[in-house]
Amino acid sequence: AAPSSLPNVSSLIPESSDVTDIIAKANEGVGGAIVHGDVAMPRTRNADPCTATGCKWPKSGRYVYVPVTISSTYTTTQRNVIIRALLTFHQSTCIRFVWRRWWHRNYLHFYSGSGCWSYIGRQTRGQAVSLRAQGCLYTGTVQHEVLHALGFHHEQARSDRDSYINILTQNIQPGKLSNFAKVPTNNLGTPYDYTSVMHYSKYAFSRNGQPTLLAKSNPNQVLGSSYMSSNDIARVNRLYQC
């Protein structure tokens, strides 16, 4: 179920850009089984994505060890962007990324594919995380796709999102409305987070430069972020009982 066709990302996007804007730009023209903008769907699972509790990585003692491989097609500098982003999880959660050994059946394989995308939660026998070398290699983008792989959906897909945001469907690009669908999420008792690295920006998939998402409490509220928020970190720690 890997996406096909290579989008043309002609310019690098500054680190200060919202992560979901970076991903949307990098994924322009990406085909294949992609939902919600950057979520890959395995052939063995229907379009009803797993909830956060259904596809966790196993815990061993105090830590959750997630084996990884990184494609040799990346330059050393590009590899280091990925490694540094992975290490941010070590600093604030019990997730520990380790190099894959031959006995690891389940693992993440980072490679420069057609855009930025990931599967939700642990899959069987290894899973791809696509981070295209031109357009996806930023700390927050890596964090975003890794959070998907750890079992997390987009923030605005939360089951309780209608209490916090308005979706302006008239401003959404044709064919992109499904990217704004809700998911029966496990919210882990954490508050709705407008500044989650998993939240769409205010203008995500806009057809006319007008907002597609607005906070109900304050239409001027910034949506999304360039890095993981404290709530993003708290959810990892709650889900994995760190």
Image: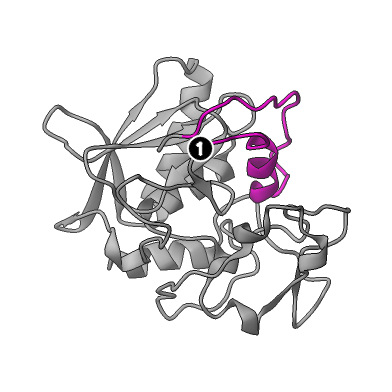
Q: Does the segment drawn in magenta span residue 37?
A: no
User: Does 157 sit left or right of 62 as displayed?
Assistant: right
The residue under the point 34% across, 53% down is 121
Q: Where on the picture, by quarter, is residue 170?
A: bottom right
Name the spot of residue 59 as percent of width and height, x first. 19, 57
Q: Quadrant of the N terminus?
A: top left
- Residue depicted at x 63% and y 84%: 163
Count of marks placed on residues? 1
Q: Residue furthest left?
A: 103
Front residue of 80 and 68? 68
Circle 1 packing at 10 Å, graded few (<14), some (14-19), many (20+), is some
Vertically, is 126 above or below 218? above
Between 60 and 176, the residue placed more toward the observer is 176
Q: Say which residue appears at 48% left-offset and 43% top-offset.
A: 33
In percent of width and height, residue 52 lies at 36, 65
Q: Is residue 17 magenta?
A: yes
Residue at which label 1 appears: 32
**Is residue 116 rendered to the left or right of residue 25?**
left
Q: Which residues are magenta?
A: 3-32
The spot of residue 216 in percent (x, y) is 75, 81
Q: Name the main secondary structure of what is drawn in magenta.
A: loop
